Image (cartoon, rainbow, N blue to C red):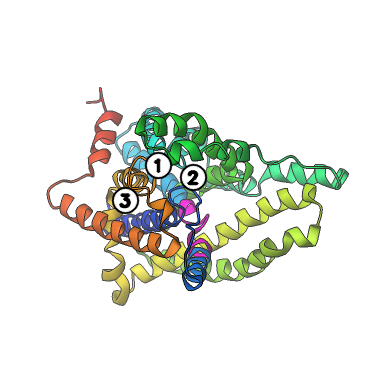
């Protein structure tokens, strides 16, 4: 990465794009508090539904996957830079993950859907595979992407397809999150998010196959770094063109299957785990469409300048992600403005775009005076504490 500045820009811009799209989703969700305002005119209800469906089709389950892929890529960049200096980065990376976990606790206190804590825990899978060859890492990543636990549940379902299924465990926790989110106490929000909301989100990620998929994406991102797939080269361009074509073709049958699989299989003991499997694959395919399309357009003279506006945003992705949670919780939750009571998806999208623009301008201004984002600076200094 140090020897190819163009590669750094495309990665920063792609990361910024992912963070912005994540924030738009968080806004229309009222930052994990699903509530439909009463008394809206029918045309607004229809518009809200259209915006909701469109944003989730484009980014739901895909933006976080882009972020996970780039997390693995970043690990490779840092590890490779240290390897060139004769150092083993794995110990520092473990410490860095613990620091990320602390950032995640702070972020989770405002927004229960935080992914930093999850990434910090799952990130440890990169340490034992960091020295394996590409082939071994690829097969491990593929095995994880296949969702082995859900295939185990499919086999159980085949043995007893009529078995009754209990509600997902996360539902019981989510049902208890309303009081502290709508209440007027910030301290109560912090306590509720960490003791009720966080277990709900962790269970939801497990129930929806995100744990195996995230670990797989971390490894695939590391492999992308090893193969220099984000470098500006002819081989890289051919790879992303092929990926765009294959992923586009794969997404169509996967999306159709995802949409209808519950009706096709009927019995919940089969349809629930099968739906998790196909949904994760469908999201993976569309994520690759987004990534490959973004990379190819970024290198096109006609689109480079437009997409490069995400670069500053992506360079301080940690700061912007945490700031999103603080601002979003204040805007929508009861301790702040309580806008969840009045805003549907249309107004929430407008608020999200406004926040993205403000954060974008702030990021651009910040890098005129600093080399790293505020939280990135803290993370970097703490990572290398005690080092020469």
Count the labels in the image.
3
Can you identify the residue that label 3 sits on? Answer: 1
Say which mark, if any, is on residue 218: 2
Give the camera-side residue of 185 and 91: 185
Give the camera-side residue of 151 and 24: 24
The residue located at (48%, 60%) in the rendering is: 59
Can you identify the residue that label 1 sits on? Answer: 75
Magenta segment, prevailing SS (helix, strand or loop): helix
Image quadrant where residue 230 sits: bottom left
Answer few, some or many: residues within 10 Å of disc 2's Cα (few below 14, many 20 plus, some between 14 and 19): many
Task: Look at the image and say whether residue 346 sits in the magenta stretch.
Answer: no
**Viewed as shown, does residue 335 lie left or right of 202?**
left
Residue 233 in percent (x, y) is at 37, 65
Q: Are marks 3 and 2 in contact (CB under 8 Å)?
A: no
Going from N to C along the chain, the mark reached first, 3 or 2, is 3
Distance from Cα at disc 1 to Cα at disc 2 = 9 Å
Q: Are marks 1 and 2 in contact (CB under 8 Å)?
A: yes
Instruction: Say if residue 53 shows up in the picture.
Output: yes
The residue located at (48%, 37%) in the rendering is: 179
Distance from Cα at disc 1 to Cα at disc 3 = 12 Å
Q: Say what secondary structure mark 2 lies in.
A: helix
Residue 4 in percent (x, y) is at 29, 56
The residue located at (37%, 71%) in the rendering is: 297
259 in relation to 12, above or below: below
Going from N to C along the chain, the mark reached first, 1 or 3, is 3
Image quadrant where residue 97 sits: top left
Task: Look at the image and say whether residue 58 sits in the magenta stretch.
Answer: yes
3 in relation to 129, above or below: below
85 in relation to 38, above or below: above
Residue range corresponding to the magenta coloring = 55-66
Q: Residue furthest bottom?
A: 302
Q: Say what secondary structure mark 3 lies in.
A: loop
């Amino acid at each position: 990465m140090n020897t190819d500045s163009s590669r750094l820009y495309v990665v920063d811009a792609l990361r910024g794009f992912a963070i912005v799209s994540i924030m738009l989703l968080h806004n229309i969700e009222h930052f994990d508090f699903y509530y439909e305002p009463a008394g809206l005119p029918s045309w607004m209800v229809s518009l809200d539904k259209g915006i909701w469906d469109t944003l989730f089709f484009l980014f739901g389950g895909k933006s976080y996957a882009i972020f996970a892929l780039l997390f693995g890529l970043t690990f490779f960049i840092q590890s490779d830079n240290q390897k060139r200096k004769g150092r083993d980065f794995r110990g520092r990376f473990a410490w860095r993950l613990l620091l990320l976990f602390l950032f995640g606790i702070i972020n989770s206190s405002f927004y229960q859907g935080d992914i930093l804590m999850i990434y910090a825990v799952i990130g440890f899978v990169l340490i034992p595979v960091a020295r394996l060859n590409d082939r071994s890492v690829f097969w491990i990543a593929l095995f994880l992407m296949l969702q082995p636990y859900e295939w185990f549940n499919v086999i159980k379902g085949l043995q007893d397809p009529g078995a009754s299924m209990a509600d997902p465990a996360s539902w019981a926790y989510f049902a208890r999150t309303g009081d502290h989110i709508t209440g007027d106490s910030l301290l109560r929000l912090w306590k509720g998010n960490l003791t009720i909301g966080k277990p709900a989100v962790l269970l939801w990620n497990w129930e929806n196959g995100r744990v195996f998929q995230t670990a797989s994406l971390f490894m695939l991102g590391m492999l992308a770094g090893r193969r220099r797939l984000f470098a500006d080269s002819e081989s890289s361009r051919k790879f992303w063109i092929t990926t765009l074509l294959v992923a586009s073709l794969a997404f169509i049958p996967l999306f159709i299957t995802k949409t209808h699989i519950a009706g096709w299989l009927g019995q919940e003991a089969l349809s629930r785990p099968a739906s998790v499997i196909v949904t994760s694959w469908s999201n993976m395919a569309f994520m690759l469409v987004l990534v490959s399309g973004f990379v190819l357009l970024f290198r096109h003279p006609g689109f480079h300048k437009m997409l490069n506006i995400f670069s500053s945003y992506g360079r301080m992705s940690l700061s912007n992600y945490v700031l999103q949670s603080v601002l979003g919780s204040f805007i929508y939750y009861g301790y702040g403005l309580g806008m969840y009571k009045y805003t549907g998806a249309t107004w929430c999208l407008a608020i999200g775009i406004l926040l993205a623009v403000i954060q974008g301008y702030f990021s651009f201004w910040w890098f005129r005076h600093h080399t790293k984002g505020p939280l990135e600076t803290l993370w970097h200094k703490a990572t290398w504490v005690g080092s020469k």
